[in-house]
Image (tube, rainbow, N blue to C red):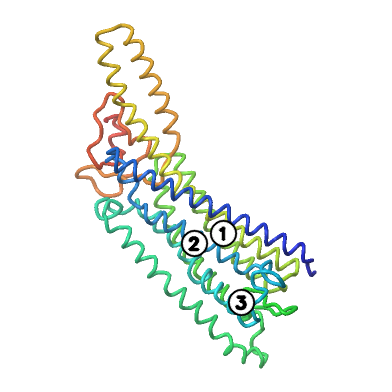
Amino acid sequence: MPLTGIATDAIGVVTICLVALQILHGLLCIIYSFYFRARIRHQGYIQLKYFNGPWIIRILFILFAIWWGLGEITRLNFLRGDGRAYGSLSLRWQEIVCKGYIISNLGFAEPCMFLTVVFLLHAPLENMEAGILSRRWNWKTLGYIMLCCIPMFVLQLILTLVEPLLDRYRGAGKLPHYFTTVAWRSDGMALCTYPLLNTILLGLFDLILTAYLFWLGRHILRLVLNKVLRRRVTALIFSASGLLAVRVIFLGLSVLSKPRHLLFETLVFLAFLTVLSCAGLCICVLVYFPVADSLAVGNLYNLEPQRRASAEHNETSSLVSNIGESSVMSLGRTSDASWKHGSISFRAYEDGSSPGTLVELSHFSPSLDAAPSPAGWPLRTAAAHIQGQP
């Protein structure tokens, strides 16, 4: 059933608003990451350096998500028609815009976005000195992401650019039009569609990515102690895997209808929502929560000198002693409340132990009466936690 112009415009406006919110959310998280990095550099939080290790890759993930969102705006029918952004473009140029969208989003932005998620999840499982704590880790990881994305980008590019050649088989009745059609011409406009061949290729990529995510998630969940962190990782893996599969199904079913028809617009909008919600969840779990949890650790270390000063005055004055006891109790409550959160960065080593010892972020901060951890040491080991040692 064809939709009215008002309904099509409403879908376009909602899409633009959601993308704008995603961009705002991403920019705020980027600012938050830079603020965290500045705190570490200027206030001497050496122990928190580990949790700031993948800061470039975190920001890169947000930039990929923003790129993807802007690409989703370019395909909207809302921008086509007289007096709109694409109103002055010829049909040929409107079709070129649709081809550019397929190559950019399905061939680059979306694969890179979820490849970045995989590398961020895998980072805590690597050796600390050669991994996140290495200055070159971010740039090496960026190179790996680009390298893994090249095959997908090239294949999507080939399928899109050889459409005229595939049209010959379509004209001979050997290949249905929806396998290769990038744009549907209607009322003097070229409306973007999703060629089934490109969607199948995206589905194969998502299938491989999903299989690796489940394998990676099994290893992470088997070693994580923090219950909150386990829930976060579980939600991230299942949402990424499930929503990617649902998106491919929606895009594949969209060939059953035409642009500006109810079924097509509904399926495409739902496919957009799946990736948007998945990207938002990944930004929270992989960028915002690790920074917020680490800043909570830093705030506790800021309170430690005040606690020690109160303890010294406690020896000379009963009044100051009461104040010191209140300060300790307040700090204890703050510590208990702060450590209800987890972080995606959770790896630690014990001298002489084999790699793979994983602990809760809540055990990063030593007890109030214990000496602080060595410089650069992210967490206490699981063995120390079980034995009750600092």
Identify the secondary structure beneath mark 1. helix
Amino acid residing under circle 3: Pro
Residue 275 is marked as: 1
Mark 3, residue position: 195
Which picture quadrant has residue 363? top left
Q: Nearer the viewer, residue 98 or 210?
A: 98
Residue 112 locus on image (x, y percent): 45, 65
The residue that disc 2 covers is 210
Left or right position of 10 against 299? right
Look at the numbered disc 2 and give the secondary structure of its residue: helix
Secondary element under disc 3, as helix, strand or loop, is: loop
Mark yes or no: residue 214 visible. no
- In front: label 2 or label 1: 1
Q: CA distance from mark 1 to mark 3?
A: 18 Å
Q: How many marks?
A: 3
Q: Residues within 10 Å of mark 1 (few under 14, many from 20)?
A: many
Up/down of 5 relative to 45, above or below: below
